[in-house]
Amino acid sequence: MVAAAAAYYKFDIGQLPDDLFHEKVPVDKWLKTTTSVGPEGFPQDSLNKLAPIPWDVELERILGIALYMIGNILPFLLPTLCVLACFFTTAKFFLYFVLAYVGILFVVEHFFLKPRFLKLYNRIDAMSDNIKDNQYLYTERNISKYLSVNFVWPKSMQRPAMVSTPMIFCAVPHGVAPFGITAYPLWSKLFNDKLCHWTCAPVVLKLPVVGYYMKKIGYVPAKSKYILETLTKKEENVGVVLDGIAGMFQGGSNQEVAYLKARKGIVKIALRAGVPIVPVYGFGHTALYTVVVDPFGILQWLSNALETSLTPFFGRYGWFLGPPRRVPVAVCIGEPIMCPQIAEPTKEDITKYHQQMLDSYQELFDKHKDAYGWGHKTLKFV
């Protein structure tokens, strides 16, 4: 239902009928399922509803995410354990445990759950050269259901406002994993028809299996060269989790922390390309896991230096490196910052538009925090 004087729109991707989750479905059919409100915003607690889901969707995400998490560290963990197992009996038993753990997860996911969902979602078991089509993964479809993901955006982003320009979607907070952004088709379809390439640390794209799939759904290295090429030469969208690894260590019971004060490089890129910066806040990201933070900040320093997470975390059931808690996620989009094209922006130019970006984040957080049930929280920039 669309309000007479719509100011904000909501798209419940988790509740979208499965037959509409396909590349060939026109965006108009998606937009017909949206709801909207006036300038007052969405009612209190209306964005934090957790919808019931089928048992197989829940099981697939519990096991699938656990497999993904261990898969990220397996290339580093296995060689280390193999060497240690030659000298220590304890390491040998731990190696056997890890192999059994991964083996069980893989067998159930690959031979039982994967065929079930490929058939349900009418997908083939292969990645093609069509990146847009690849973004309709059954795994990411299920995470939208598991976390009851909603997208919210202002009138200024509603079609056809941005159909002709590439954009940089700048999402925070990272949390352990920014699952709200993984509804990949939305970034390539809702606001314009330009493919959206999300970015990640270059080391992630070198990982076996994980790196292959990420490349196939459009990921590029989080380096200015690749971002600029995507925006200007390909004229396609880019998505950046702006606080990166530093965002894993932020957050608290009464305060959300956004590591953005030093993130001016993205503003320089936007000015050189002459494209809008679109602030995105993932309400719920910091509630999905419990991160173990050492009091001296050593793990945080090492993680930032190596551009990869080295901190332990616990999810649902207290599961180490396991699935996230079932917490609703609201992906809220702010007013875009319209950046003029400046070949060599000055420090003053960068500072001006960086402040506009911070202001837009603050505005969107304050506008939607009551609707998410976080009226007691404040947003702090560091």
Image (cartoon, helix red, strand yellow):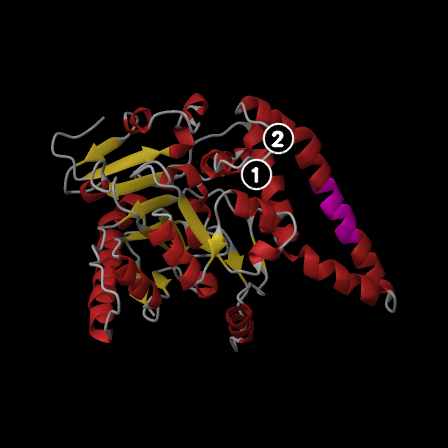
Q: Is residue 102 magenta?
A: yes
Circle 2: element type: loop
User: In this rendering, is residue 263 above or below 200?
Assistant: below
**Residue at 44% from the left image edge and 27% from the top image edge:** 22
Residue 44 visible here: no
The circle drawn on residue 237 is none
User: In this rendering, is residue 362 above or below 56?
Assistant: below
Residue 118 visible here: yes
Residue 336 at x, y = what percent?
Answer: 23, 51
Residue placed under numbered mark 1 in the picture: 61
Name the kind of residue labelled 2 in the image: Asp
Tell me the distance, in whole angstroms, between the alpha carbons under discs 2 and 1.
18 Å
* Mark 1 residue crowding within 10 angstroms, few (<14) / some (14–19) / many (20+): many
> In this image, 152 relative to 227: left or right?
left
> In this image, 3 relative to 259: left or right?
left
Residue placed under numbered mark 2 in the picture: 125
Task: Specify the quadrant of the image occupied by residue 79.
Answer: bottom right
Seen from the viewer's position, the closer of residues 27 and 45 is: 27
Seen from the viewer's position, the closer of residues 259 and 219 is: 219
Name the kind of residue labelled 1 in the image: Arg
Which quarter of the rendered picture does the N terminus lie within? top left
Residue 180 at x, y = what percent?
Answer: 42, 45
Seen from the viewer's position, the closer of residues 236 and 78 is: 236
